[in-house]
Image: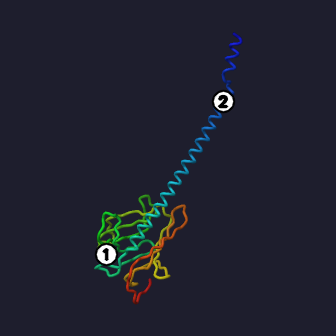
């Protein structure tokens, strides 16, 4: 009987051995959890960076397509393009929504505010070319980019850059637009957009 009791005791775990085993298990679980957490964080960061890059590409494409197709005027205004550092207004045959093709649209591109009071690059569109009768009328509004730290527009003719532009005063549309923007936590960016517009510039005066 004494030998049987001794064999049973030697076959089990002591309290110290059990505590060591539990400690090692806890450490291994902590290491595994930390590795998994870091992996998920890296995946989220990578997805956020990919989403941000996609937002940049889409925003730049939409803006470049509409501006490069800007038309010099309408029946009511022979030349129309007005802009400052915070917004620009112009006519374009490019609609914000692909299914809504046909006609000339009035676009307002601006540094706006989101519902959470964040700076955004927004576009407002109306098909009312008599914009001066209802300058604040909006049929479609899209946010092209959010989470911005800064945003401003500049207008150029030749090698000169201006902070404002009035097509009726300078007798024509700008040759190009620069969009200066910075997303929060990112390096500043500059979009250069060329306008494919042919205007008479005899006697033109820059702003």
Give the CA separation, mark 1 to mark 2: 81 Å
Count of numbered labels shown in the rendering: 2
Q: For the residue carrying disc 1, how many other residues have a C-alpha within 10 Å: few (<14), some (14-19), or many (20+)?
A: few
What's the residue at 65%, 34% (across, down)?
23
Mark 1 and mark 2 in contact? Answer it, CB < 8 Å.
no
How far across and down, in percent of the image, does residue 106 sit?
33, 72
Q: Quadrant of the N terminus?
A: top right
Q: Nearer the viewer, mark 1 or mark 2?
A: 2
> Regarding mark 1 in the picture, which secondary structure is present there?
helix
Residue, far top? 1
Q: Quadrant of residue 102?
A: bottom left
Q: Is residue 140 above or below residue 4?
A: below
What's the residue at 49%, 79% (across, down)?
161
Residue beneath disc 2: 19
Mark number displayed over residue 166: none
Q: Is residue 171 above or below residue 96?
A: below
Residue beneath disc 1: 132
Q: Is residue 32 left or right of residue 162?
A: right
How far across and down, in percent of the image, does residue 81 sit?
38, 77
Q: Is residue 130 above or below residue 169?
A: above
What's the residue at 40%, 73% (across, down)?
67
**In front of the other: 130 or 79:** 79
How far across and down, in percent of the image, does residue 178 sit?
47, 74
Q: For the residue carrying disc 2, how many other residues have a C-alpha within 10 Å: few (<14), some (14-19), or many (20+)?
A: few
Q: Which color scheme is applied? A: rainbow
Q: Quadrant of residue 20?
A: top right
How far across and down, in percent of the image, does residue 61 sit?
43, 67
Nearer the N terminus, badge 1 or badge 2?
A: 2
> Regarding mark 2 in the picture, which secondary structure is present there?
helix
**In front of the other: 206 or 62:** 62
């Amino acid at each position: 009987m004494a030998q049987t009791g001794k064999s049973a005791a030697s076959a089990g775990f002591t309290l110290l051995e059990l505590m060591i085993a539990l400690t090692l298990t806890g450490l291994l679980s902590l290491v595994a959890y930390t590795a998994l957490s870091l992996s998920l964080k890296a995946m989220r960061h990578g997805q956020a960076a990919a989403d941000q890059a996609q937002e940049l590409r889409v925003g730049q494409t939409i803006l470049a397509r509409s501006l490069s197709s800007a038309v010099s005027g309408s029946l009511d205004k022979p030349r129309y393009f007005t802009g400052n550092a915070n917004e620009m207004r112009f006519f374009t045959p490019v609609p914000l929504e692909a299914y809504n093709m046909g006609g000339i649209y009035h676009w307002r591109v601006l540094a706006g505010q989101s519902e959470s009071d964040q700076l955004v690059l927004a576009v407002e569109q109306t098909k009312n070319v008599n914009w001066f009768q209802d300058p604040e009328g909006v049929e479609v509004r899209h946010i092209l980019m959010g989470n911005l730290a800064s945003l401003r527009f500049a207008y150029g003719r030749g090698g000169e850059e201006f902070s404002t532009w009035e097509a009726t005063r300078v007798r024509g549309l700008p040759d190009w637009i620069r969009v200066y923007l910075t997303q929060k936590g990112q390096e500043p960016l500059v979009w250069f957009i060329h306008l494919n517009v042919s205007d008479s510039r005899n006697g033109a005066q820059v702003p």
